[in-house]
Image (spheres, rainbow, N blue to C red):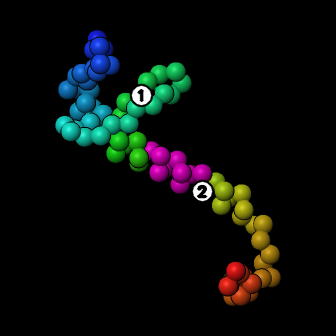
Amino acid sequence: MRVSEKGQITIPKYLRDLAGIRPNGDVSIHLEGGRLVIESAERSETVANKARLERFLMALRKMEKTGDPTISADDVMRATRDR
């Protein structure tokens, strides 16, 4: 595969189809372990959202059983309201 003087390449159709890259669609390009990765922007967004969700769930798991069981939800609401 050649790169044009303008830095353009043509991705073969079978690879575009496998990657879910549609005509006139957006792509995400980034480096991953020294390799250039090109993927549909839709897939990239989905992967990023899944990673963000996993980080959030991991943070919640770390907080599990660290609260004071004697404090009710209503007490917390009263203490944090109007701040």
> Tag 2: Cα neighbours inside 10 Å, few (<14), some, or many (≥20)?
few
Dot label at residue 72: none
Extreme-top residue of the structure = 2
Q: Is residue 79 left or right of residue 60?
A: right
Q: Quadrant of residue 82?
A: bottom right
Q: Quadrant of the N terminus?
A: top left
Q: Quadrant of the C terminus?
A: bottom right
Which residue is identified by label 2?
56
SS at badge 2: helix
SS at badge 1: strand
**Residue 8, percent from left and from top:** 28, 21
Q: Main secondary structure of the magenta part?
A: helix
Q: Quadrant of residue 4?
A: top left
In this rendering, the count of numbered labels is 2
Q: Looking at numbered disc 2 in the image, what kind of residue is underneath it?
A: Phe
Extreme-front residue of the structure = 6
Residue 4 included in the magenta stretch of the image: no
Q: Is residue 12 left or right of residue 42?
A: left
Q: Is residue 72 visible?
A: no
How far is mark 2 from mark 1, CA to CA?
Answer: 25 Å
> Tag 1: Cα neighbours inside 10 Å, few (<14), some, or many (≥20)?
few
Boundaries of the magenta span? 47-57
Taking 8 as reference, is 67 above or below it?
below
Q: Is residue 74 visible?
A: yes
Name the residue: 44% across, 44% down: 47
Q: Looking at numbered disc 1 in the image, what kind of residue is underneath it?
A: Val
Q: Is residue 64 left or right of residue 4?
A: right
**Residue 34, percent from left and from top:** 52, 21
Which residue is identified by label 1?
37
